[in-house]
Image (cartoon, rainbow, N blue to C red):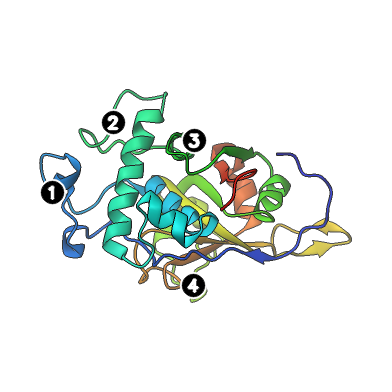
Amino acid sequence: RPYDGRPLHPIAWEPRLPVLDQTNLIAQGIRTTEHGLGQDVDALGSCTGNAAAALLSIILSPERAAAAGLETDNTTAAEHFAIGLYADATIEDEWQDLVWPSQDCGSSGLGIAKALRNRGLIDQYGHATTSKELCTLLQTGPVLLGMPWYSAFTQTADPHGHVDADPTWADSPLEGGHEVCVTALEDVAYVDGVLDPDRTVLRFRNSWSSSWADHGDGRLFLSTYIALREQIDAVQPRRDGVSP
């Protein structure tokens, strides 16, 4: 979805869903044996499903979300829903042969977008490959962001949840890949009419409980997206042409 040249404005899309937690599952009363796994585990690599659940709580009306099985007022039920989405996404990921629940293999933004479309919850999805395209998508709705995840991001001590507040974040160990739901273009800064990525801020919903960062939300500068762009998958599931 190319940038069309129109001015970019701050905008926020708030999930109608509590912050989910893909860790500490047993303490939440979530048993993975209920999803077909042979044993109960305490954490899953189900970030794609969790990010998609947050996104759906924004783009679907409460009535349609409930009809789809997403209980936006029940954290445990919503986490079960997210795990189901994760399982569907692993089937759609054509680049690997492993699927969950037999293997906790992770999944992708493309896989989860296909899973949402197969369920009839969206009617299309589009990608961003530049910073301006990403900001353009955020003008119309939330965006799923799959990105390299560094230990500095996990251990953020910034009171505002800026995972990249430490300028040496790229020197910290790479922990793997992680999917989040970008919910806001929080600050938009221009210098002489040119977008300033060092002062333009994205806010995202994570899935590590409300105790992480800013009550479960994190922030990053657009310059960090630019630095990692070649390793990032930004996809926006949409409901264009159908009622919410």
How packed mark 1 is, by other alpha carbons closer than 10 Å (few <14, some 14-19, many 20 or more), is: some
Outermost residue on the bottom side: it is 159
Q: Please name the residue that numbered disc 1 is placed on.
A: 40
- Under mark 3, the amino acid is Leu
Q: Please name the residue that numbered disc 4 is placed on.
A: 158
Instruction: List x then y, in percent, for residue 7.
Output: 82, 57
- Under mark 2, the amino acid is Val
Tally of numbered discs: 4
Residue 110's disc number: 3
How packed mark 3 is, by other alpha carbons closer than 10 Å (few <14, some 14-19, many 20 or more), is: many
The CA span between labels 4 and 2 is: 36 Å
Residue 99's disc number: 2
**For discs 3 and 4, the disc positioned in front in the rendered view:** 3
Q: Residue at x 30, y 56 (%)?
A: 79
The CA span between labels 2 and 3 is: 15 Å
Q: Earlier in the sequence, mark 1 or mark 2?
A: 1
Left or right: 83 as drawn, with respect to 63: left
Left or right: 85 as drawn, with respect to 5: left
Quadrant location of the N terminus in the rendered image = top right
Q: Are marks 4 and 2 in contact (CB under 8 Å)?
A: no
- Under mark 1, the amino acid is Asp
The CA span between labels 4 and 1 is: 34 Å
Q: Please state which of residues 243 and 5 is positioned toward the viewer in this rendering.
A: 243
Q: Please state which of residues 235 and 72 is positioned toward the viewer in this rendering.
A: 72
Q: Earlier in the sequence, mark 2 or mark 3?
A: 2
The CA span between labels 3 and 4 is: 31 Å
Outermost residue on the left side: it is 39
The CA span between labels 3 and 1 is: 27 Å
Instruction: List x then y, in percent, for residue 60.
Output: 51, 55
